[in-house]
Image (tube, helix red, strand yellow):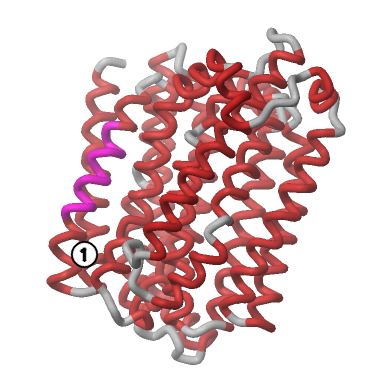
Amino acid sequence: MHFMRSLIKNVSQKGFFHLLSSNLLIAIVAFGSQFLVAGILKPQEIGRIRIFQTYIQIFSVLAALSVSTSILKLISDQNSAFHNYKAYKTGLNIIIFCSIIVYVITFVLNENGIMTDDPHLIREFRYFSVIFVITSLNSYQISVFQALKKIKEISLLQIVVRSGTLILMVAMTYFLGLNGFFEGMLLGLIISYYLIWAKLSKSDFGINAALDEKLFFFTYLKKNKDLVIEHLKLGGPALIANIAGILSSGLDVIFINFYIKDKALVGQYGFASIIFVGLSILTQTINQITTPYLVSYSNNLPDFKKAFKKYDRLIILVSILIAACLFAVLPFVIRRLYHNKYNQAIEFIYYFIVYWFLRNISILKVSAQIALGKVRINAFIGIFWVLINAALFYFLIPKYGVIGASYSIIIGGVACALMYYFSMKSELKNV
């Protein structure tokens, strides 16, 4: 008990719970805003939003090259303030330089109808795909605050700017429809970036800007190629993991975009996936809480094994209860709340609940692998999972339509859960 109190005090002092609570609140607001938007727009418009968001997530990862991860290691108390600033500015220029390349490529792909053949989506990508650039920059600035150990400061600012963005999106969607959704997103992200950048610039860290060379983009990167190499070396594994993570959650939407022409049906599937996004808040919260907890046990393997087994059983039990309640309650709530607008989505929701259950019972195993330093195992399973899902989507969606995507995520989820189970079982034998 004394150990738990000291652990909680330690992580609280470092701002962990501020970061956790802000991320949790933001996720809940985002989840709620999507439900409100779903009530305003037509199902086919929800489908287009889901496709757009999936592509934007992929573009953001490619543009950032995971410098948001590498900067956490390159900025250190042991380095001079000026060195830390140069590491920051190098990462910033990497994002800008890569964003230009990614933007040009996506523009060409979009204008030639390669990403989608939907004329509405082609138009939205033409005017709003720049959102991925601002998203990457915002993520990077927040990581810099974390690296500077100013977690409490950025947590409150995050809540304000992200909640404000989501409120703006819902309001503009209400008055302007689908275009309002994208315009609200773009405007909100620009305001967010400015506020975060302004706070960073006024900090002690930002003062070093006056000491650095007034060089930008390729010229700056060329002059600081050692820091570029460090960024790429440290961010490389995270880039692979991030791409695998995005594809594992969005690959179904990409295949549906190519194979399914009925955008209203795609919208029903997209609405069902919102339920999964909401449930994933719980999964992510468990991961954020349990990882530092299990890391603290990693030097005492018998206690680690005991703690893991205890909480793994608890998570499985809670997951069963939550899934059972959702099966019983959600159909009734959705029919009443949306006046039968998303009745077709209910069948897909059942599959997403099962999929969430399979993901959730594996989350403690993911945390345990990280605590034991077995990060490569998680990366291997993630890559293998993406490949399994890609093969399933490729064969089942053309044959069975949208429901084929539901079959695929369940089969892939079972395969992934079994891989985590047997890999963790093998690790515990050695503990």
Viewer-side residue, 109 vs 343: 109
SS under mark 1: helix
Task: Residue 57: give x, y in percent of width and height.
Answer: 47, 52
Q: Quadrant of the C terminus?
A: top left
Is residue 135 located in the magenta-colored stretch of the structure? Answer: no
Q: Is residue 28 above or below residue 388?
A: below
Q: Amino acid at mark 1?
A: Tyr
Question: Is residue 5 visible to us here?
Answer: no
What type of secondary structure mainly makes up the magenta span?
Answer: helix
In this rendering, would 225 be left or right of 417?
right
> What residue is disc 1 on?
407
Q: Is residue 295 above or below residue 274?
A: above
Which picture quadrant has residue 5? top right
Residue drawn at x 75%, y 30% is: 150
Viewer-side residue, 86 vs 5: 86
Residue drawn at x 71%, y 32% is: 145
Residue drawn at x 67%, y 68% is: 184
Segment colored magenta = 380-391
Residue drawn at x 48%, y 69% is: 49
Outermost front residue: 219
